Amino acid sequence: MAESDWDTVTVLRKKGPSAAQAKSKQVREWLAAGSGRAAWAWRGRGPAGAAGQNKQHFITKNTAKLDRETEELHHDRVPLEVGKVIQQGRQSKGMTQKDLATKINEKPQVIADYESGRAIPNNQVMGKIERAIGLKLRGKDIGKPLETGPKGK
């Protein structure tokens, strides 16, 4: 028991440098050697240093072409004219937005979006609203009474 020395430390294996430290040392050695390669190669911007790198930040011809593109791509919205027709037709039948939504099995927010012109037109929803309020919402005769004829099968 007298021979126990608690201050003695035994090192089995020395811990090596971290990946960042190793890379930094490698770059310093490479630059100090005066290699003929350009300094940008080790930063991941050239063929020598780009291996295994995430290349999503490279600017290509296509990126520049997309930046010059001026066409705005967006979905068409319901015209405000159609929204007004829905609102007038609903009010003439004495229905609230919630009543109309319940009648056509949609959420009240859908009716609010159609009336305000924020909705992207959906033919199924438009057809259900047309039948519920009895007014045409599509085509040339927007706002005219819906003709209810026999179903042709």
Image: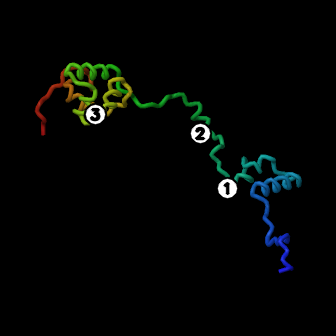
Give coordinates of residue 44: x percent, y percent: 72, 49
58 vs 84, left or right, is right
Give coordinates of residue 136: x percent, y percent: 23, 24
Quadrant in which the C terminus is drawn: top left
Separation of disc 2 and disc 3 at Cα?
39 Å
Task: Identify the mark at residue 52; answer none if there is no mark.
Answer: 1
Task: Identify the mark at residue 145; answer none if there is no mark.
Answer: none
Helix, strand or loop for disc 2: helix
Which residue corresponds to mark 3?
A: 125
Badge 2: few (under 14), some or many (20 or more) residues near its Cα, within 10 Å?
A: few
The correct choice, above or below, for 35 with respect to 101 in the image is below
Q: For the residue marked with disc 1, what is the amino acid? A: Gly
Give coordinates of residue 128: x percent, y percent: 23, 32
Q: Earlier in the sequence, mark 1 or mark 3?
A: 1
Badge 3: few (under 14), some or many (20 or more) residues near its Cα, within 10 Å?
A: some
x 41%, y 31%: residue: 75
Which residue corresponds to mark 2?
A: 62
